[in-house]
Amino acid sequence: MSRRTHSVQSSSPASAASRPKPTGPSAHPAKSAQSPSLFLRPAFWGGVGFTALFAAAGYALALLPGLQRVGPMACAILLAVLYRQFAGYPEAVRPGIQFVSKRVLRLAIILYGLKLNMDVVLTQGLPLLVRDAIVIVFAITVMMLIAKKLKADPSLSLLLAVGTGVCGAAAIAAVSPIVKAKEEDTAIGVGIIALLGTLFAIGYTLLRPLLPLSDTDYGAWAGVSLHEIAHVALAGAPAGEDGLATALLAKLGRVFLLIPLCFLLVAWQKRRSPAGDAKASVEMPYFLLGFLAMSLIGTYVLGSVFTLPAGVMAALPTVTTFLLSMAMVGLGLNVHAKSLGTKALRPLGAIALTSVALSVLTYLTI
């Protein structure tokens, strides 16, 4: 906090004393994280270190038998949620945690663009791209209809719908600021989709020997219906190199469609916002331009115009996942235990039914 701000607040001690002191995550607005002196504050580096420590612990936890398929992001969220319930929110390092859960999250999404090979999608995956678009529309529509019937939380249901239709946790993280979802909803959504997607991916691998599908058809089915890239890789592996390549190509098409989907959501939010309502204004998701730029750089620049060392290229996916895990820790610290029971059960039922319907529909149309 600057001296100027401090002097304004301290000029009216009587009125300040008469107001109740806010508590909880909402007590510290995100604007405080934009102070020029933020990077000089011990609370900032303490918060960054806190999230990094829990992200590393999530990686370690994901190495244990039974948790390997869940992934480090989900494990990091689990650890953060447990910490919040037993130790409370670490107020002393809040500025750094808020910075990570907002700014670092956007940086991770930008780096995630390196996973998207534009040339492969546009030259080899156009037929799959049409199918991917249908899958996204189907997943979002069916999920929201089921959620309405079940009276599930609409904000969390929308996040899960986008995650199911597009690319899991990364899609949820990308759209949450656009639809102004609570950080708690984002964390719960990422945890649900990581768990359910893992269960579905394991189920696919068990069904593979029983299905009358060729390797490439099975790969296409996995790619257009499963939630995360990691889930697609897990399920596509039993189909061999050709099947796995087809699975990843189909999935990349859905990742590519995240960009137009986000801009459609921006337009939708603007139409829903009352005219002249500043609080309802929709922030332009400029980080998506970074996502697109990194996709173009990864496709047309790296390896042709200039080449990075092999070690750096190999480390980039790990760095991206680690940054996402750090951000998930920050989000997970906002989850209340009561919300898991009151908010999560009905959306979980809705996404489970939607995922089953999506798997069946895509299988029948392969």
Image (tube, rainbow, N blue to C red):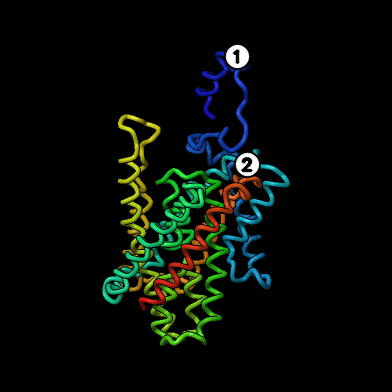
Q: Out of 91 and 217, give the one closest to the viewer.
A: 217
Q: Quadrant of residue 161?
A: bottom left
Q: Give x and y (percent) for residue 257.
A: 33, 62
Left or right: 250, with 21 as reference point: left
Residue positioned 47% across, 45% down in the render: 181
Which circle marks residue 93 in the picture?
2
Does residue 292 sit above or below 219 in this rendering?
above
Give the distance between the C-alpha atoms of the residues marked 2 and 1, in whole angstroms.
Answer: 26 Å
Q: Position of residue 349 (x, y in %)?
A: 54, 58
Dot 2 or dot 1, earlier in sequence: 1
- Measured from the top left, where is residue 113 in percent x and y? 39, 62
Q: Residues within 10 Å of mark 2 (few under 14, many from 20)?
A: some
Which residue is depicted at the point 65% across and 45% down? 338
Residue at the (51%, 52%) spot, across then down:
150
Q: Quadrant of the N terminus?
A: top right
At label 1, the amino acid type is Pro
Q: Which residue is mark 1?
A: 13
Disc 1 crowd rating (10 Å Cα; few below 14, some 14-19, many 20+) is few
Q: Indicate the amino acid at tag 2.
A: Val
